Amino acid sequence: MIKSILICDDDENILEATRIILSDKGYEIDVAKSGEEACRKLKEREFDVLLLDLWMPTLDGKETTKFLKSQEKTKNLPIIIFSASSQIEKITKEIGADGYLKKPFDILELEKIIEEHA
């Protein structure tokens, strides 16, 4: 069965790069440009993994993660935070995300963390 990944980032270049990399690995990809859009898409359908940027306007990755982990439908959804923050590991633990990927990321690291959680 093909695994589905929702990628959420407000940076178009990162969205496109991660979409191409993971599509080429055989994953079904959907994208969102904000935390609000990600939450809407997760209401409409299920995904196997959410790859979520930390810093976004309005509903950021912290708030999005906390909200999704508090909802029955999405509380077990693996959420991978990706960010250039030097505090990414600490923040990931604080908000209850399932993993992290530091930007800029290596393609093999991206593939590995998705495989671990998908």
Image (cartoon, helix red, strand yellow):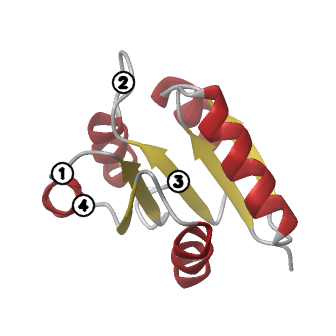
Tag nearer the camera, 3 or 2: 3
Quick check: can you spot residue 44? no
Tag nearer the camera, 1 or 3: 1
Question: For the point 65% across and 27% down, which residue is it?
Answer: 12
Residues at marks 1 and 3, CA–CA distance in whole angstroms: 18 Å
In the picture, measured across the screen, residue 95 lies left or right of residue 53, that is left
Residues at marks 3 and 2, CA–CA distance in whole angstroms: 15 Å
Residues at marks 1 and 2, CA–CA distance in whole angstroms: 20 Å
Residue pointed to by mark 4: 96
> Residue 40, how many percent across, how many down?
60, 30
**N-terminal of the two: label 1 or label 4?**
1
Residues at marks 1 and 4, CA–CA distance in whole angstroms: 17 Å
Task: Tell me which corner region of the image, top left, top right, bottom left or bottom right, holds residue 15.
Answer: top right
Tag nearer the camera, 1 or 2: 1
Number of the label disc, if any, that sits on residue 86? 1
**N-terminal of the two: label 1 or label 2?**
2
Q: Tag 4, which secondary structure?
A: loop
Question: For the point 51% across and 75% down, which residue is it?
Answer: 113
Q: What residue type is labelled 3?
A: Leu
Tag nearer the camera, 3 or 4: 3
Q: Which amino acid does label 1 sit on?
A: Ser
Residue pointed to by mark 3: 51
Quadrant in the picture for the C terminus:
bottom right
Residue pointed to by mark 2: 59
In the picture, measured across the screen, residue 24 lies left or right of residue 4, that is right
Question: For the point 74% across and 49% down, which residue is it?
Answer: 19
**N-terminal of the two: label 1 or label 3?**
3
**N-terminal of the two: label 3 or label 2?**
3
Position above or below: 98 against 34: below
Question: For the point 53% across and 35% down, which residue is it?
Answer: 9
**N-terminal of the two: label 3 or label 4?**
3
